[in-house]
Amino acid sequence: MKLLKILGTISVAGGLILGLSGFSFFGLLGEEKEKLPPLAAVKPTIQIKTLWTKNAVKGNGGEFILFQPAVGDDTLYVSDASGRVAALNRTTGKTQWSVRTGKSLVGGPVLGDSQLFVASADSTLLALDAKDGKTLWHVSVPNQMSSAPGYGEGVVIAKNQDDALFAFDVKEGNLLWKYQEGAPRMLLQGSSVPVISQGVVIGTFADAKLAIISLQTGKLIWQSVVAEPSGITELTRMVDIDAAPVVDDETIYVASYQGNVSAVTLRTAQLVWTHALSSYTGVAVSDSLVLVTDTEGYVWAFDRKTGQVSWQQQALKGHTLTRPAVVGDTVVVADMEGMVHWLSTVDGHFVARQMLSKKGFVAPPVVEDDTLYLQDRDGTVIAETVLS
């Protein structure tokens, strides 16, 4: 279940929120998700090779906490909820080092300046040496963090559940500035990671707010609301940006829960196009398409320039999907049942399907040099490639 947080309540073990215990994204209060019908068989038209599989770390510690790998030149970095961080050889999957931070982590590691940055459940931001995992510095962040930090241009940014951003120098962890958006009344318990690009911070907040903030000063440059509430109750009127936007070619692509997928110009905040849909996983961008998975389990492809729907795949309805990833001419999404679905970028038809995990996937696949990396909910990491 994707969960909600009400201002003033406390997240507790087992994925419950005080006051909203049992709420499910996929139904009403207390309603359980129905058993999914079997999917139609897929005749593969591409050949996929599994390069290696490694049970490098442990599990998520929560249903929708995203432990997404970070990719270096020759190394893949992974972490888990128990506080373990490990470095794997990208070619072989062999463990190069593994350390225990002594903290319960709330998201995957972020790589930058030869360091790894991780956030803990007790509101600690840690910097580790990427060469051996030794802790270089750590700082406390007010209130609880629920996602990985963001990194760029020598700055690491933590976001807490009060919708505040804290910018730190990567060398010593000195606080550079703080940006306070204002504590939301209701938000999804998720992982909207700040994005740094071209001297600015792209921050996403509850109520579907998108803000551009100066990386140097922490001052607001512009803010836009990319989705408006439309329901009749407080719950159905909630809109939230729960995943990091993508910045490409001076355009920000962003999706929101109970809102829209939108394209907005980085410098002027001009809305290029928008399309109504509900997503908490975010978007992926190819040369010509913007790809989104929605809360119904549909996979969408939009023309990058116009926002016109290029295709829609509905066969995965009811499946809880990850954010898409693009591998060559294919789109890859994984699901909570442990399946990995490969679709054609041309029209969205299935070109392959694999059953790779008994525990399932919630973290989005990561692609580097045409290699796909997945980390399942039990900490197993898988590397795959498409054979030409």
Image: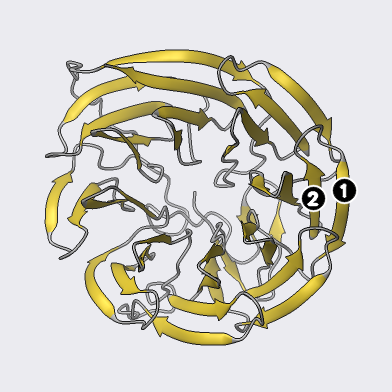
Q: Which residue is mark 2?
A: 127
Residue type for callout 2: Ala
The residue lying at 79 percent from left, 27 percent from top is 98
The residue at the point 35 percent across, 77 percent down is 226
The answer to which of 113 and 40 lies nearer the viewer is 113
Numbered label attached to residue 136: 1
Instruction: Please say if 350 is above or below 276.
Output: above
- SS for callout 1: strand
Report which quarter residue 4 is drawn in. Answer: bottom right
Q: Up-down: is 311 above or below 333? A: below
Given the image, on which type of amino acid does mark 1 rest? Leu
Taking the image as shown, residue 338 lies to the left or right of residue 79, namely left
User: Residue 209 falls in which quadrant of the image?
Assistant: bottom left
Q: Quadrant of the C terminus?
A: top left
Which residue is at 75% across, 38% downward? 130
Q: Is residue 138 above or below residue 111?
A: below
Element under disc 2 = strand
**Picture coordinates of residue 122 (x, y %)?**
81, 57
161 and 116: which is toward the camera? 116
Asked whether residue 367 appears in the rendered view, the answer is yes
Q: Position of residue 206 (x, y in %)?
A: 50, 74
Q: Is residue 120 left or right of residue 238?
A: right
> Tags 1 and 2 in contact by the CB under 8 Å rule?
yes
Q: Is residue 102 visible?
A: no
